[in-house]
């Protein structure tokens, strides 16, 4: 899946980064490259947390798992 990052150079010279598709994915870095790397880590962490929460919510239930195509491609 692809995500879109938004970068803003702050007054202190650092770069603020946020993901359009996951607004709670926010970080910063000294360079755009560092901010991008940090944002990728935050997105991964948030997705792992969401997966754990869903697993807890549906623990003990019989579920059917199916992969779906990228929403943008539908």
Image (spheres, rainbow, N blue to C red):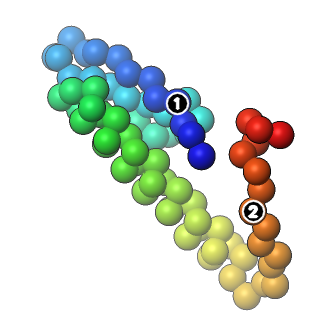
- Give the quarter of the image for residue 35: top left
Picture residue at 40% right of the left edge, 36% below the top: 26
Query: Residue 5, position in %: x, y?
Result: 46, 29
The single residue placed furthest to the bottom in the displayed view is: 60
Q: Could you tell me which secondary element the residue under label 2 belongs to?
A: loop
Query: Residue 74, position in %: x, y?
Result: 83, 40
Q: Residue 28, which numbered label?
A: none
- The residue that disc 2 covers is 67
- Give the quarter of the image for residue 44: bottom left
Picture residue at 31% right of the left edge, 42% below the top: 38
- Give the quarter of the image for residue 70: top right
Question: Neighbour class for label 2 at 10 Å: few (<14), some, many (≥20)?
Answer: few
From the viewer's perspective, is 62 left or right of 55? right
Please determine whether, in this image, residue 63 is positioned above or below residue 74.
below
Q: Residue 4, which numbered label?
A: 1
Q: Could you tell me which secondary element the residue under label 1 belongs to?
A: loop
Query: Residue 17, position in %: x, y?
Result: 37, 29
| Viewer-side residue, 53 vs 69 | 69
Q: Are marks 2 and 1 in contact (CB under 8 Å)?
A: no
| Viewer-side residue, 14 vs 73 | 73
From the viewer's perspective, is 19 left or right of 72? left
Query: Residue 14, position in %: x, y?
Result: 21, 23
The single residue placed furthest to the top in the displayed view is: 11
Q: CA distance from mark 2 to mark 1?
A: 22 Å
From the viewer's perspective, is 53 left or right of 57? left
Regarding residue 23, the answer to whether it shows in the image is no
């Amino acid at each position: 899946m692809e995500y879109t990052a938004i970068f803003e150079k702050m007054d202190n010279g650092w770069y603020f980064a946020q993901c359009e598709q996951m607004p709670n994915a926010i970080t910063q870095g000294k360079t755009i490259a560092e901010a991008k790397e940090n944002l990728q880590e935050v997105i991964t962490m948030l997705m792992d947390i969401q997966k754990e929460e869903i697993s807890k919510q549906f623990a003990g239930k019989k579920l059917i798992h199916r992969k779906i195509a990228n929403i943008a491609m539908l």
